């Protein structure tokens, strides 16, 4: 079945460009468009898309609030949200991920990356490539400092799982983590899966947010503490 996509962006030319790129894919179907956040919430409920390509800065309701509202709807087929942003001028990306977005893509990314991103989040994965994670961390370091709160769920993790989580939060890929810990790629995938299960997190994106808010890692820290 084709991946049903809803486009939410206040710029008609951007929506048209996204529709042209995604509509040309045999496994993707554009089911609707919204020119503001309120429209995105309404159309998401009416059209039941698999993925919403969500802009951050929109009138009436911004992308962060719209993402939160969409994911708060009680339904078995809750859509995945892919945030698209200029990033270097958007200060709300971290808030969008905290609100439940499955990942984000820069608006200047190559066209083929948009289709790939839609497929990734539709499959239930998160779109947070290591290089993007590092830029996210850099942006987060510019945010006002918040006192870390260590949730009780953190105690459920083993010492190795905490180590893996901290490396994920620092932008390491599974392959990089495997090399650093001298374990197999499959072992790292198992650790990540168990971390997500124990912490009741949906994906890698939420794991990064959790690690920072829990104080497991701090903004600007790129290497494990010695």
Image: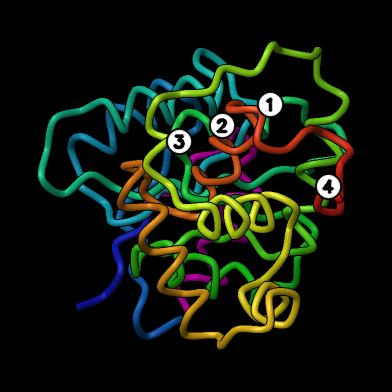
Query: Dot 4 corresponds to which residue?
Result: 225
Q: Do the residues under discs 2 and 3 have CB atoms within 8 angstroms?
A: no
Q: Residues within 10 Å of mark 2 (few under 14, many from 20)?
A: many
- Marks 4/2: CA distance? 28 Å
Q: Using a 10 Å C-alpha cutoff, classify the residue at mark 3 as few (fewer than 14 neighbours), some (14 to 19) or many (20 or more).
A: some
Residue that numbered label 1 is attached to: 92
Q: Which region of the structure is painted magenta?
A: 6-24
Closer to the camera: disc 4 or disc 1?
A: 4
Query: Which of pointers 2 and 3 lies earlier in the amino acid sequence?
Result: 2
* N-term-proximal mark, 3 vs 1: 1
Going from N to C along the chain, the mark reached first, 4 or 2, is 2
Relative depth, front residue between 66 and 150: 150
Chief secondary structure of the magenta portion: helix
Q: Are marks 4 and 3 in contact (CB under 8 Å)?
A: no
Apparent side of residue 138 relative to residue 60 in the rendered image (left or right): right
As helix, strand or loop, the secondary structure at mark 4 comes to loop
Rendered residue at 37%/42% (across/down): 156
Write the residue at 45% across / 35% down: 154
Residue bearing mark 2: 96
| Between 24 and 45, the one nearer to me in the picture | 45
Q: Are marks 1 and 2 in contact (CB under 8 Å)?
A: yes
């Amino acid at each position: 079945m084709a991946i049903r996509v809803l486009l939410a962006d206040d710029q008609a030319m951007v929506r048209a460009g996204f529709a042209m790129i995604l509509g040309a894919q045999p496994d993707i179907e554009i089911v609707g468009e919204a020119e503001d956040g309120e429209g995105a919430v309404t159309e998401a409920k009416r059209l039941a898309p698999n993925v919403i390509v969500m802009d951050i800065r929109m009138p009436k309701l911004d992308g962060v609030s719209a993402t939160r509202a969409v994911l708060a709807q009680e339904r078995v087929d809750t859509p995945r949200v892919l945030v698209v942003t200029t990033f270097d001028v958007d200060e709300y990306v971290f808030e969008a991920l905290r609100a439940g977005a499955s990942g984000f893509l820069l608006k200047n990314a190559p066209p083929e990356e948009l289709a790939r991103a839609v497929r990734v989040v539709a499959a239930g994965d998160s779109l947070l490539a290591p290089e993007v994670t590092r830029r996210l961390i850099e942006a987060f370091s510019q945010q006002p400092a918040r006192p870390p709160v260590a949730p009780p769920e953190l105690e459920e993790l083993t010492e190795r799982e905490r180590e893996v989580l901290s490396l994920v939060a620092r932008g390491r890929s599974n392959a990089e983590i495997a090399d650093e810990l001298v374990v197999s790629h499959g072992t790292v995938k198992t650790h990540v899966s168990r971390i997500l299960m124990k912490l009741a997190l949906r994906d890698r994106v939420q794991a990064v947010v959790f690690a920072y808010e829990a104080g497991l890692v701090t903004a600007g820290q790129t290497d494990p503490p010695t």
